[in-house]
Image (cartoon, helix red, strand yellow):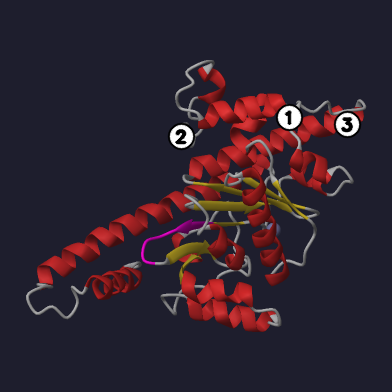
């Protein structure tokens, strides 16, 4: 079965950690089979959610990603993560084009400074739990790290047309660091991480880690959106719906930004207005004006 090998890995990891493996009074075959079946079900469910996210981001009418652009990933149990294979399109992504990888084989790449693309590619091949799985894309390195941040369980990366127009302009940093309207704060957070242009691959992954850490230190919160200058967006969330919502709102905000810029703007919200909305979102005791702060991520994929 497709995820059996990954599940066996997770179970052996849990078994060694708890001391259950090797205990002669434990591990009747029926129990093990049941555990593997449950594990396969959970992993399949996460992969199905990841596929739905990919399909939503890859919808042709949304112009968020075309051809082989973009990537998605999800955190799994046992130090594993699922990530889109290199060279595949988001819109028609299939389960066979997703690789299950070991985080502990990928994360150390971020601490190496002198690695060629070929060395990174072979490290990514080695990180696969199933050697028959396709090679993860080079973006798997930043996905692996972002999935270790806070309660981030899903990550989506794409190149939305409107956002990229702004990110390729001299106003890119303004767009990342300022806010124009309440919905933007609700779905994209009070500010986004801004990453100056870096070569896709390890240099970009280093920049993403460094800038995201700086953001969390200064803002005291996990970002919802990371904007890559002259490149695209990365959205983070605990659910695929949260990731999609951030990307869609970022795209809407970029179109508003471009229109307002053509008329001499935009007029940005004042910091106290931004904080007021951001504060209400994180303060469950505040029951006022639920229209802006009720859980923004409860809608379903259509
Ligand atoms: Zn990209």
Splitting the image into 4 quarters, where does residue 79 fall?
Answer: bottom left
* Residue at x 41%, y 76% (from the top left corner): 130
**In percent of the image, x 87 and y 46: which residue is there?**
169
Q: Which residue is mark 1?
A: 271
Split into 4 quadrants, where in the image is the N terminus? Answer: bottom left
In this rendering, which labeled residue sits more in front, label 1 or label 2? Answer: 1
User: Which percent across, then down, holds residue 240?
Assistant: 49, 45
Mark number displayed over residue 300: 2
30 vs 237: above or below? below
* 161 left or right, relative to 170: left
User: In front of the other: label 3 or label 2?
Assistant: 3
- Ligand 1 position by quadrant: bottom right
Membership of 148 in magenta stretch: no
First of labels 3, 1 by sequence position: 3
Q: Secondary structure at mark 1?
A: helix
For the residue pair 116 and 299, the one nearer the viewer reads as: 116
Q: Nearer the viewer, mark 3 or mark 1?
A: 1
Measured Cα–Cα span from mark 3 to mark 2: 33 Å
Tag 3 near tag 1, CB within 8 Å: no
Which mark identifies residue 242?
none
Instruction: Give me the residue at 40% from left, 53% from top.
Output: 46
Q: Please state the horizontal and vertical placement of residue 65, each as a whole percent of the image.
A: 67, 50
Number of residues whose C-alpha sits closer than 10 Å to that of mark 3, classed few (under 14), some (14–19) or many (20 or more): few
x and y percentages locating residue 128 in the rendered image: 46, 75
* Residue nearer the viewer, 301 or 209: 209
Secondary structure found at label 3: helix
Residue 85 shows up from this direction: yes
The stretch in magenta equals 73-78
The numbered dot on residue 261 is 3
């Amino acid at each position: 079965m497709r995820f059996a090998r990954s599940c066996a890995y997770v179970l052996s990891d849990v078994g060694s950690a708890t001391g259950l493996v090797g205990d002669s009074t434990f591990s009747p075959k029926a129990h093990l089979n049941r555990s593997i079946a449950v594990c396969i079900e959970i992993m399949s469910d996460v992969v199905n959610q990841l596929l739905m996210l990919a399909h939503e981001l890859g919808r042709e009418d949304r112009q968020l990603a075309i051809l082989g652009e973009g990537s998605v990933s999800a955190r799994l149990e046992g130090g594993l993560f699922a990530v889109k294979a290199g060279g595949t399109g988001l819109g028609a992504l299939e389960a066979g084009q997703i690789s299950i990888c070991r985080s502990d084989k990928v994360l150390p790449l971020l601490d190496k400074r002198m690695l060629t693309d070929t060395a990174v590619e072979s490290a990514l091949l080695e990180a696969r739990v199933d050697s028959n799985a396709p090679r993860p894309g080079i973006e798997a390195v930043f996905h692996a790290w972002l999935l270790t941040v806070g309660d981030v369980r899903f990550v989506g990366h794409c190149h939305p047309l409107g956002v990229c127009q702004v990110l390729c302009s001299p106003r890119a940093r303004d767009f990342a660091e300022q806010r124009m309207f309440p919905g933007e704060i609700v779905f994209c957070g009070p500010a986004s991480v801004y990453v100056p242009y870096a070569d896709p691959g390890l240099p970009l992954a280093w920049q993403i880690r460094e800038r995201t850490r700086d953001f969390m230190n200064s803002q005291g919160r996990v970002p919802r959106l990371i904007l890559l200058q002259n490149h695209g967006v990365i959205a983070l969330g605990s659910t695929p719906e949260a990731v999609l919502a951030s990307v869609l709102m970022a795209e809407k905000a970029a179109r508003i930004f471009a229109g307002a810029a053509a008329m001499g703007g935009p007029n940005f919200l004042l910091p106290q207005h931004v904080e007021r909305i951001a504060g209400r979102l994180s303060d469950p005791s505040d029951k006022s004006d639920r229209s802006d702060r009720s859980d923004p991520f409860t809608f379903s994929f259509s």
